[in-house]
Structure formats: structure tokens, C-alpha cells
Image (spheres, grey):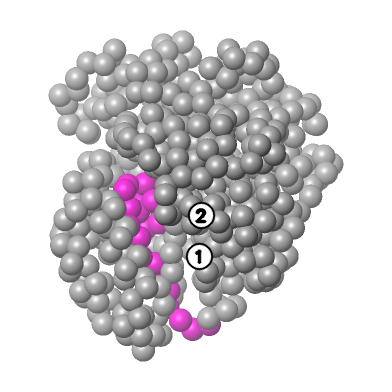
Amino acid sequence: MLYTSTRNNSLRVSAAQAIAQGISEEGGLFVPCEIPEFTLSDIEKMVNMPYIDRAKTILKTFLTDFTEEELTYCVEGAYGGNKFTSEKIAPVVNVNGNENILELWHGPTCAFKDMALQLLPYLMTVSAKKTVDGKEIVILVATSGDTGKAALEGFKDVENTRILVFYPVDGVSPMQKLQMTTQEGENVAVCAIKGNFDDAQTAVKAIFTNDEIKAQLAKKDMMFSSANSINWGRLVPQIVYYFSAYADMVEQGRIELGDEINVVVPTGNFGNILAGYYAKLMGVPIKKLICASNSNNILTDFLTKGEYNRNRTFYTTTSPSMDILISSNLERLLYHISGNDDTLVKELMSQLNECGVYKVSEEMLGEIRHYFDAGFADEYQVRKTIQTQFNDYKCLLDPHTAVAVNVYYSYVKRTDDDVPTVIDSTASPFKFPKSVYSAVFDGTEVKMTEFETIDEINEVLGVEIPEPIKALKNKKVRFTNVCSKEDMSEMVFNLLNL
Ligand SMILES: *Cc1c(COP(=O)(O)O)cnc(C)c1O
């Protein structure tokens, strides 16, 4: 299996190269040159198979340059032991009727980013050995919350890697900040920066591409890499859980092998739902991929009308991981839907860069509509959905998942579609205790601290607190560094002892 770039069709690289490099030189994203196909009988074999084996079955079709031993090492390192608090890793839970929730937050940081970021460090170190042997990889991350913590937890104490995370000093939730500043591990460092997320992101990008810094690193046999969701190594682990969810639906007797399901995904950067698209192309009987957005509904507009226009108001919502106006992974969809037209993708991406807007042809829109449906939920609808799902089914949703559930209900109302549906649940409600608690109690202001609210949710609502959140209470804060954005490169040198 070889990979090419969305902006240069003639390029060919191995999986290891794509993962170690992260992004193609001309700025395009790596995509597989062909899509592996699974028959229903292949999928039937996954029923009653442990998650680790399901993962190996999928990964080995994409990572053909990895040996069987390497794949086993990677997958068992990521999902084995007791890193996940559910034996199923990503269990499917029936809520009511056709509504099923795929719980993707049983990993060490209680967000779905763990599904990929527990595996990525293994894929990356094995890839590096094959392509740039002997170098120490330095992962630089700018985060608005979830990615930073999940990357720290994934890379902690991984041989031949270091990880440095920068977060905006006032731009993350109190729980997220505590999760990062108490991070354990010998190869990790965390620093707050005076500025917002964009400042952190811009400064990290500048450090990445600074030749002088790169040369200094090279002298010490180090190189930078990135753990964000444009890396193929973060996308491929996500394809697995769509196969796994389908196998579980069969296992639970909710569908017969071959029956169609719908999938609803709370979407930000378009990584998660794109993995669902690959799963459908590979043979999972998915009828519609339903893209759920919050008030930042740029994707709803694009997937229904064909125009992507980022010249619009940006809203800060209770589902911050979906507050995004540029969904990077959409580029991969455009490439596949256009029949691998790299010239067109390049043109659309430069229009987006220069004018903030592009439009696709009627033909392409038709193709997109064949696979995708889309909708959005505003803040009022999110609160109401959290309240109703709890009152009716004792199912406590985090705000991101609530967006998806609300969009699912509107979809059913609009289409009368009665196909069994899997809704991705992307975070534990305990990561957003105040929003969730307030929603259940009709919008009343929460005056308690974060941990008081967590205990209250546990005692009053009777919902179990995940172990990693409980453990946070007694952890020591290790990182108190704050620096200005101008001093970030200096900070990188200090933290790496250069
Ligand atoms: C990152 C994230 C999302 C968005 O996922 P994408 O792959 O970027 O579309 C949704 N919910 C939560 C909780 C997240 O952390």
C-alpha cells in the first residue's frame, strides 16, 4: 500500500514515511492510493473478536510496510494492559430504539482523542526507525484543550520521543488545565503562553519551520514532528472503531449481518467522520454519515449547499472542540470525491487561503450528498438535549455528544429514516461538569467548584466518575511555566536542554 498527496498526485511514499513526515512537502495531506475492501464474511469474522484483533485486522491492510510483530507491539501497547477502563475499549450502548451510543472516551484522558493518540506514538516510533533511524522525535503541540492532554498521555515515557505542549493561559477549561499541569512522565513538558490559541498555534508553526532551530536539533540527533489530526497515523486508528461498532451491533443482535446503519459524528476538524467515510468505502454497510455541528455550522452549509465560506461569525460554545472554522481533513474528502483531482484540490485550497471561500460543482455536491447528511444544534438545543436524555433514559451526555444526539433527532424527524443508528460519543460528561450539571437542572448557575460539581453529579445524578478524573484530585502540579509568545523558542531550547 502506497500513499500519495492531495496536492501532488504523482508522489508515492510508504505508510512509515507518511506517518513520520506528517504532512507532504507541498502542503498536501497524505492519502492511501487504493482503498482496501472487506466482504461481509470478513466483517463477520470480527464479531466476537477482541478490539485489539479488530484493530490489527484493519491496520495491516493500510500499514503493509509494518511487520506482524511490529503491529502487535503497537496495538497491544496502545489498547492492552488496563489503559482503557472498558474491556471493549469502544463499547456500543443502546439508549432506546434505534439510538445507540458508541462510547469513545474510556481512555486515559476521557476524550475520544485517546483512540488515536494512544496508538500514534507507537506507529510513529516504528515509522521513524524505518525512515530516520536513531533520531529522537520532538513532538510540539499547541492545544486548546483535549489534544494536548491526550498527546501527553500517549507520548509519556515513549522511548526516543519528547513532547512539549503549549496552551493559552486563559484559554482552556480548569479541568483541562489541571489534566495537563499534573502530567507525569520523564519526557514531557507543559507551558502556558500569554495569548490565545491562535497565538500558540502560530508560534508553534514558526518554530517548526525555523531553519536555525531545526539545525540546532539536528546536531543533537533530534527532529520535530506533529501529533495533530492531519497525520495519517491519527486517522487510521479511527477507522477501526467503525468496523468494531458494526460488529458489536451484530453481536448484540440489533442488526443482521449486511443490514445498514447510520452514523452520527460530532464534528470539528472532520477527522472522525472522515474515518467513517473510509470505513464505508471499505465495506461497512453505512447508509448515511451524518455530520453534526454546533453553532459554528460551516460544515452544515458546505455539505448541503456546496459552498465553504469561513467569512462568518465565530462562536465560543460549550462544545469547544467543535469551535472551528477550518476543518483540515475536508481536503482529503475533496480529493476522493473529485476522483483524485489534485489540481482542483490545490485550486480550492488556495481560494480558501486567499478569499476564505470556495464552491464545488453540482456534480461533486451530488456525490457528497450521496454519502453525507448534515445538521447543527445551537446552545439552547444542546442544553435541552442533555436534560431530556438524562430525564428520559438516565443517559448523561457531554455537550459534544449532545450536539450529535440533537442532530440525529432532527434528521429522523425530517427523513423518517428508521435505520439503526450509531452516535459517536466523544467525551465523558465529567470533562465538562458545570455545563452538564447546569443543563440537567434547567440552566441554573453552578456556584460550586469543578470537583464539587463532579461529586454532586455522582451523588445526585448517580453517574459513576471515571478513574482518571477521580485521580486528578490528588495529583501534584508539576508545570507552572508561563511565557510570552516571543519567548517560546527560547522555552523550547530550555526544555530540551539545548
Ligand atoms: C476533537 C473533538 C471533536 C471533533 O473531532 P474531529 O475529528 O476534529 O471532527 C469532537 N468532540 C470532542 C470531545 C473532541 O475532543
> Which residues lie in the magenta part?
133-152
Q: Can residue 145 be seen in this view?
A: yes
Q: Is residue 84 highlighted in magenta?
A: no
Q: Is mark 2 within 8 Å of ligand 1?
A: no
Q: Which labelled disc corresponds to residue 27?
A: 1
Which residue sits furthest top?
392
Q: Is residue 425 above or below residue 215?
A: above
The amino acid at mark 2 is Met
Look at 41% across and 30% down and name the residue there.
294
Mark 2 residue element:
helix
* Amino acid type assigned to the residue bearing label 1 in the image: Gly
Front residue of this view, candidates 301 and 152: 301
Assess whether mark 2 and mark 1 are in contact (beta carbons under 8 angstroms).
yes
Q: In this view, does 137 lie to the left or right of 459?
A: right
- Residue 49 image position (x, y, % from top left): 71, 44
- What residue is rendered at 43% in x and 69% in y? 225
Front residue (pair 215, 80)? 215
Q: Quadrant of residue 227?
A: bottom left
Query: Residue 299, position in %: x, y?
Result: 49, 36
Which residue position holds label 2?
A: 349
Mark 1 surroundings: few (<14), some (14-19) or many (≥20) residues within 10 A: few
**Position of residue 418 in the picture relative to residue 374 (left or right):** right
